[in-house]
Image (spheres, rainbow, N blue to C red):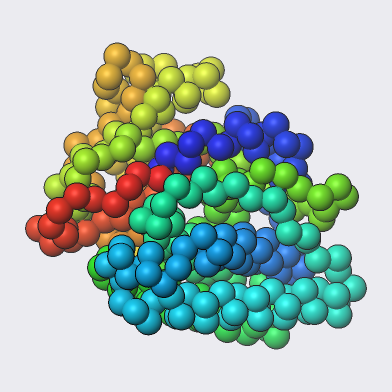
Amino acid sequence: MHFLNAIALFLAAGLSIASPVVKRLPTPVVNDATVLNFILSLEYLQSAFFTEGLQNYTQADFVGAGLPDTFYDNLKTIYEEDRTQITFLVDSLNAAGVTPIQPLTYAFGVPDVKFFLTLLSVLEGAGVSAYLGATASIVDKASLTAVGSVLAVQSRHSSYIRGALGQGPFPNAFETPIAFNEIYTLISVFIAGSPANNTKLPFQLYPYLELECAQYYYEADRSPVTFQGAFTTAMQNNPNITASTPVYAVFLSGLQRTFVPLRITQGNEDYKIDTIPAMALGQVYVVLSNSATLADDENIIAGPAILQVYPKGMAPAGSPPPCL
């Protein structure tokens, strides 16, 4: 995904998240309070995005983009439910004697309603994956139930939006869990600033992974994918990586991980694969790994990037949505 190189702005801002990982670090150790603050930070981001969209675009704008008359009011409902979840999380953290993280300043760079809709689906899907990944770190049963309750509602939101956009409301039999560092790398590109003395979360950023803007819908078992400038970036961040070093694109879809060897193209700057694996469906995450079997904090060298992948032969007609 191309986020207008906003990560450069984020790294210059001195925020409450650590700088990009170059040397591999252990997976962060978290407790239940950390998980709740992590989820709260995602809710703040989603709420800010909804606020911007509802302020900038009218019901007529969404109808003009091909959505039904009811879509605008349903977006308002989703926004209100997100606000209710924020209040619940803040109250829960305060009751436990934990300082809640404060909202950050965000820059989404949305130029029009179609871009808003494309990014809306991505953020809702990423929220579901983030909450699912976070559940494995929760110890307290009451906290686990609360996060599970939020997760279920977030999944309904994502399904509704995907269905309205023609992406398929349930593209996979399983949701895709995403780890803390992976999701924080994704959302960091939208962060423009942070309040002083904000609560710090113990997560690291991976180097950015940019997709070349494709002029076609991605299909499983058919479409190629180019990771723009990824080989150059990998060499800059990892002195041991050369043109002869095996590097793999790891596709995360549902509960599966598939490792695909990368080749170098475009004047020794890009990494590329020729075919998306058949298992990759729906909102798919891709990281680059220096291992043929592992994709964790010790092995990931870039990513994740996000692809919307359709079953082979089932992509919509017409032009794909705007590249992000």
Position of residue 296 in the picture relative to residue 323 (left or right):
right
Kindly give the residue lying farthest to the left in the view shown: 313
Which quadrant would the C terminus be assigned to in this image? top left
Percent x, y of residue 60: 37, 69
24, 83: nearer the viewer? 83
Relative to 72, residue 182 above or below: above
Name above or below for residue 70 compared with residue 32: below
Give the residue drawn at x 81%, y 66%: 100
- Residue 194 visible, this angle: yes
> Which residue shows up at 41% across the image and 17% down it?
242
Residue 93 picture quarter: bottom right
Question: Where does the image place residue 33, in percent across and percent down from the top left?
Answer: 77, 68
Q: Find the residue positioned furthest to the top.
A: 267
Identified at 36% across, 56% down, the residue is: 114
Left or right for 152, reference 22: left
Q: Is residue 56 left or right of residue 232?
A: right
Q: What residue is drawn where x is 42% and y is 39%?
A: 2
Quadrant of residue 118 in the image? bottom left
Say which quadrant the N terminus sits in.
Answer: top left
Residue closest to the eye, 321 or 256: 321
Q: How many marks?
A: 0
Give whichever of 274, 244 is nearer the camera.
274
Residue 311: % across, % down: 18, 61
Residue 284 in sight here = no
Question: Residue 266: x, y in percent?
Answer: 27, 19
